[in-house]
Image (tube, helix red, strand yellow):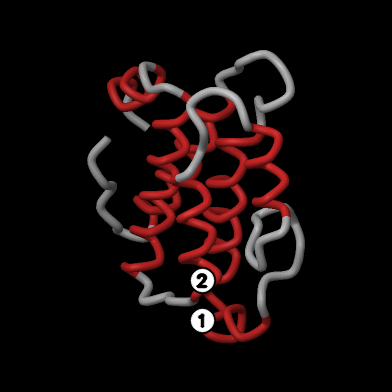
Amino acid sequence: MTSEFSRELKTLSPRNLQRYASKLLRAYCEAKSIRHEAIDELTAHLDSFPDGGGLADWEQKGALLPLNGRGDDMPSDLEQSIPSQDIDDFRHVVDSAVEVGIVDIYGASTDLPVKFIEKISSILRKNNIDLPQL
């Protein structure tokens, strides 16, 4: 990870960090031709990260999604559509994208959202997938 990229990430608001994580998830799925309604629902949810209040409601709605990035099983038809060599990376990208928004939701702000984005970015780079612009 370049230090310039990390510096730029640290200037983003929590909402913009969450939206960028959603972009990274979409970029991974597009590059790997992974398509499913549950992914669309999750990215729409991530993109709706609230600016101020309402974080608890937003977090609870996300927990109810079929693909929620919190260790629950993903829809079986989605899992079966992903090549076995990509399933671990897909899970890491999904879980990390979700963690960007919820890791600091009930406590003080930390650098963990940036670290999760860096983790996703590393997975994309490893797979020769271009990162979307910040």
Above or below 10: residue 56:
below
Residue 32, image x and y in percent? Answer: 37, 72
Above or below 26: residue 49:
above
Residue 86 badge: 2
Please indicate whether residue 28 sits to the left or right of residue 99 in the image. left
Badge 1 amino acid: Pro
Residue 114, image x and y in percent? Answer: 49, 28
Residue 129, image x and y in percent? Answer: 30, 57
Corner quadrant of residue 64: bottom right
Above or below 40: residue 50:
above
Image point (33%, 68%), residue name: 30
Corner quadrant of residue 53: top right
Taking the view exactly as shown, the residue that stands out farthest to the top is 108
Image point (66%, 68%), residue name: 66
Instruction: Name the foreground residue: 62 vs 116.
Output: 62
Badge 2 amino acid: Asp
| Residue labelled with disc 1 | 83
